[in-house]
Amino acid sequence: MTDNQENPDAEDAAPSGRATLPLRPPCERLSCHKSSVCSRSYFVVVMVFFHVYIINVIALLFYVHYSSGQEDASRSRDAPGSSQQRPESRRPPSKPEFLRDVSLTRVEGIRVGHVQRVSLVPGKVHEMRTLSLKPLLFEIPGFLSEDECRVVMQLAQLKGLMESQLMVQDGHEELTKELNLSPEEIFNLLDINQDGQLQLHEILTHSRVRDGIWLTPENLREIYAGLKADKDDNGMLSLEEFRLLSTDAFQRKGAHQVLQDIKTRVTRLTRLPPTLVDLSEPLQVVRYEEGGHYHAHHDSGPVYPETACTHTRLAANTSTPFETSCRYITVLFYLNSVEGGGETAFPVADNRTYDEVSLIQNDVDLLDTRRNCDKSNLRVTPTKGTAVFWYNYLSDGRGWVGEQDEYALHGGCVVTQGTKWIANKWINIDPDYQRQARYQQLVSQQPEDEDDEGLTLNPGIQSTDIHQDL
């Protein structure tokens, strides 16, 4: 049956009758062709991948070898006594690097309204209340006693620490009349150690005349001799001798233990190293008359690479086109209770966001505390003895000063009745740790007995003694 079916096909394939070889079926031929092609393609792909792999391995070996060679060369250059040191490494570094061994403690606010109990003076506990978290702002009632407030105001007028820069020019009588201070009270304020004698260093400690000029011991001896005040010529003044000494002989003078106590209390409140507080700006006292106000502002500005802090500018060893005060913390004291107005306003405290454009909307300028103080998010009523303090900078997350806290915008509302007395204590810290460390090193190199040999005010290097009683 099968033979009968195949013969016609054979005849069709060879009609001439010649003998031919049997042909394989087309399917078999095609199958063999496909298998060969697939095998060659697969081989080519495998070989390509294999060569790529080999090339990658060789490249990796070259990279490792090159990197090891560079590291060895670097080690040999850095090794002591190496003869192949680069010229740069033989030059001493221009700025010594300081290890960061100081971490700034920040008081936690927890939440608005949270009250913490803090020990600032022996035998007494103060309550510290959180007023806002942006900025981190606290209020401490009773920080100063009534007597301390009175002394600070009197010292401000006596020493010219006020913003008005009161200068005593018409003699002891007018000073006594204006301040309502007797010679005994003035003598007591100047007598720091309360031993009943005014030593040269007590008067010299802060006897600045004006424009950064300070009196030297020789200056004072000349004053004593000219006025014949020092009768026993022992270099000290008793109360009787002091009465003979005209007050306008040195216009800004003296200090009081109260200021030392306040500085110590601020150190405990902020939990900062005492050195940072000692080297910061002196206490500033300001008096606002009726109608007085201060538009909203920041106590310190942002610090950019081209910006230097005022207190460390000499330690920067570079010239910069811009300076800012770098006031890490502001501590504000209310020296009296204001009869009307005079609140401290924080226009954007605890806002969700901060945008300078939004400070002026619908003809309302939040920076204008004369007109729009009532529109601020937070206002603190001035109460005698109360202190408020806030951070002007955020933390950098590593225990040092970070970026400026823009929410620390604040100002003084209009005094509508009476007068307003406040004092500011700023704590200056450079966000650049290296600059701050170099500054402190420079200060530590100053002679400790500088006051005994004559004191001049260097605007770039201010010793602890210069600041501690201002």
Image (cartoon, rainbow, N blue to C red):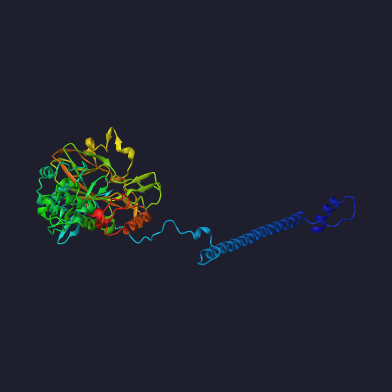
- Which image quarter is the N terminus in? bottom right
Quadrant of the rendered structure where residue 360 is? top left
Q: How many marks?
A: 0
Q: 465 above or below 165?
A: below
The x and y percentages for residue 396 are 35, 54
Determine which quarter of the picture holds residue 230. Answer: bottom left
Q: x, y percentage for residue 433?
A: 36, 55
**Residue 239 image point, x, y percent:** 10, 54
**Residue lying farthest top?**
363
Q: At x 80% / y 55%, what residue is drawn?
A: 5
Residue nearer the viewer, 339 or 113: 339
Query: In front here: 19 or 329?
Result: 329
Visible in this render: residue 145? Answer: no
Taking 133 as reference, is 178 left or right?
left
- Residue 93 in percent (x, y) is at 45, 58
Identify which residue is drawn at 11% across, 45% down: 176
Indicate left or right for 70 with 305 as reference. Answer: right
Q: Is residue 90 visible?
A: yes
In the depicted view, which residue is nearer to us: 421 or 125? 421
296, 174: nearer the viewer:
174
